[in-house]
Amino acid sequence: MSFPLIFERSRKGRRGLKLVKAVPKAEDLIPKEHLREVPPRLPEVDELTLVRHYTGLSRRQVGVDTTFYPLGSCTMKYNPKLHEETARLFADLHPYQDPGTAQGALRLMWELGEYLKALTGMDAITLEPAAGAHGELTGILIIRAYHEDRGEGRTRRVVLVPDSAHGSNPATASMAGYQVREVPSGPDGEVDLEALKRELGPHVAAIMLTNPNTLGLFERRILEISRLAKEAGVQLYYDGANLNAVMGWARPGDMGFDVVHLNLHKTFTVPHGGGGPGSGPVGVKAHLAPYLPVPLVARGEGGFYLDFGRPKSIGRVRSFHGNFLALVRAWAYIRTLGLPGLKKAAALAVLNARYLKELLKEKGYRVPYDGPTMHEFVAQPPQGFRALDLAKGLLELGFHPPTVYFPLIVKEALMVEPTETEAKETLEAFAEAMGELLQRPKEWLENAPYSTPVRRLDELRANKHPKLTYFDEG
Amino acid sequence: MDYTPHTEEEIREMLRRVGAESLEDLFAHLPKEVLNPPIDLPEPLPEWKVLEELRRLAAQNLPAHKAFLGGGVRSHHVPPVVQALAARGEFLTAYTPYQPEVSQGVLQATFEYQTMIAELTGLEVANASMYDGATALAEGVLLALRETGRMGVLVSQGVHPEYRAVLRAYLEAVGAKLLTLPLEGGRTPVPEVGEEVGAVVVQNPNFLGALEDLGPFAEAAHGAGALLVAVADPLSLGVLRPPGAYGADIAVGDGQSLGLPMGFGGPHFGFLATKKAFVRQLPGRLVSETVDVEGRRGFLLTLQAREQYIRRAKAKSNITTNAQLTALMGAMYLAALGPEGLREVALKGVEMAHKLHALLLEVPGVRPFTPRPFFNEFALALPKDPEAVREALAERGFHGATPVPREYGEGLALFAATELHEEEDLLAFREALREVLA
């Protein structure tokens, strides 16, 4: 039995929420030619049916609240319930209300900006970008404006990314009008310094790096990389997806990065919400501050205000003031933990990952770049096993699988990030399950999962004949 | 409090297992020049104190419930049933549904969302959501440029100025040319569309609240081989002729009006709908129905070759995280109201806005600006500086008079009404404005 769609629960004439007592006549208010002729085919359900529908759907879904979720590079840590309550305190504010009546909200933004600057070692910050990739685009547009301002916009046309980079890095560079060049990783999994030197030059605008990188390895030669970049007039971009590993222990600003984006929905506990909304603040060094998007929250004699007077700004990347309610949650997280708590969280994220790595090696998994990995690591199954089948097997055993087939430089990659909020026994149970999978018959693995709400789905059919809405004939 | 479960003994045991002496040891390989920097952060606080501090900050704001402020965000009823359902941990704490077998909740709800947006806009498909209305517009225009292979964009001045600012930032990056069509008498004149133009962009109702007839724009765009991109308010589509019925090729907008908290501007969600023929150029996630190995209906992310994690530098967009949960809240709202409920809420706002319009024009010195017919917002010309008026109204406990950028004219402010406003609210607000302008 398939779970019904909300449209299949619909009954003509059934009503749920009724918010209006006396309903005016459309024709009295709006000229007929502007009115819609056919009503939208929205579901017609009562409130209890609505509640059963979405409650039922939620039971066909796993989240951090239900399941260990060790997705590499996604930092699926616990999202404190406190934060949901705090966000409600600020729900009823209008972005265009008089700033004098929003001093608490503006102060919160200003303070969060100060905290994030302190944690990243940056001089100025925007809270406007709505997600990590959005922060990347903002950061690269800032770099572009900087080069153009110096008369080097036409010559610096290339952005360098390591071959281990997140896909959003090259996609961002393309979106900002740049050509992308990949820099190979060396045998130790870190950026190949010689290869990087060959690529650097007056045609390069920026290097985008994640540190620790997607193999979980800290780029130990980062100071040399940043020196080389500086000498070549190249801006160094920090993808903050992996900041959880070094939060409080080391700062991108001190490593020589010029631009940093943060993922408040990873490192700073804003819930992922099934894919969003997130928040992607961007911090920059002083030389890039004039190009930050408008408005910035500023502090003046009369209180906090929105500063639009920034002639070199790249403009706007989002309407209003960004995903403000995400900022409230991040503020609450930082104030709850303080520096000691953030450092402990980072250290235990690393400890959990290292511990789990040892357990998985014991179970027969390989770790091809087995250096001093930090908050995540990339494992490989023994010969003959497919990462996809192991992932599907894990679903059957009650775990969300790691990120699979990424980074691209490791075959059958299983990218594991347990985060600091998971208990030792959870890691051990996960390792047991991973070990058990290697004992299962191949056929069992290839057909797993069995008892999930649906089993393996026909992707090919969806790609060839996508059915994208209920009314879509396919 | 740091939300970590480790006991001291467990930490010692785990450190032994990984061959480290201490937690500091785990960072010993970092360059010493960058290790342990001095960082100035406030002391950690217990949970009750964090809540207290935030309540203190919240008390420094004057809530904008029943605000008369316009400008793309309005004070609407936020149904508790939607809030309660969206707060379920399975929705709240899930990642992107890359493992469909355990993500049918988010996937099916997104499929239903896509269906509802397609229905509202009168188009065939919608993606899983964008960050907000402004970025949905920018991505919608980029889609039109990819589809037509052209680099020119004509955008009406009636499109929200912040949306146009975002559009400009996105288009400059790829070297596209943006030309603005100034409003005439509060509406957009139908332009001549040149060969280089790939997208014509019009908002209905426009930024000043006036209704635009999109039909002639569709004709002008199509006649020149360009696409029409319509910016729409989803609540208005419960009543108004949808973009698709006018011949628009792409519809975008912001979902706040579908019962989402204003939240000082976000998060809301952006929607992006288009024709099925353009689906392979769509940015962002897309959910399709399919079947599992037992023939049961199921849902998954599809046409992923468009996306960054597969295509990298050749992706249609870099978008990854979107606004899934807020988009699902929009869908829950639409399901809670149904077509009748949505129509009623939309019409009530229009009715109250017209009553408000008439009442505010009674105040000496106030002149009309937005031409009729308008929807649930309108601009008025005020005899005093709008920012000062907004401030003085706030001192009297009212939120109203969103200052309109000077490009539209001097002394203009936007006013809005919604289903939340009752006759006595309008009267009290008129009196406050009368005092402020006296």
Image (cartoon, coloured by chain):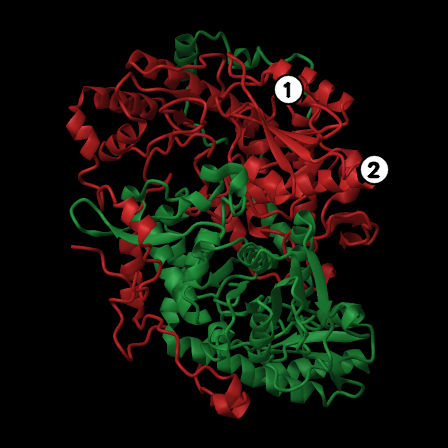
Chain colours: A red, B green
Element on which disc 1 rests: helix
Q: For the residue carrying disc 2, how many other residues have a C-alpha within 10 Å: few (<14), some (14-19), or many (20+)?
A: few
Q: Amino acid at mark 1?
A: Leu
**Image mark count:** 2
Residue A37 vs A448, above or below: the answer is below
Q: Which residue is mark 1?
A: A196
Percent x, y of residue A209: 60, 27
Does the image show residue A258?
Answer: yes
Q: In this view of the protein, which residue sits in the foreground, A235 or B41? A: A235
Q: For the residue carrying disc 1, how many other residues have a C-alpha within 10 Å: few (<14), some (14-19), or many (20+)?
A: many
Q: In this view of the protein, which residue sits in the foreground, A149 or A88? A: A149
The quarter of the rendered structure image containing the C terminus of chain A is bottom left
Element on which disc 2 rests: loop
Which residue occupies 56% across, 24% down? A343
Q: Amino acid at mark 2?
A: Arg
Q: Which mark is residue A241?
A: none
Residue A146, quarter of picture: top right
Residue A152 vs B270, above or below: the answer is above
Q: CA distance from mark 1 to mark 2?
A: 24 Å
Percent x, y of residue B273: 47, 62
Q: Is residue A443 left or right of residue A416?
A: left
Image marks 1 and 2: residues in contact by CB distance under 8 Å: no
Q: Chain of mark 1?
A: A
Residue A233, quarter of picture: top right
Q: Which residue is mark 2?
A: A150
The quarter of the rendered structure image containing the N terminus of chain A is bottom left
Does the image show residue A19?
Answer: no
Percent x, y of residue A274: 41, 47
Percent x, y of residue A409: 45, 23
Residue B201, quarter of picture: bottom right
Q: Chain of mark 2?
A: A
Nearer the N terminus, badge 1 or badge 2? 2
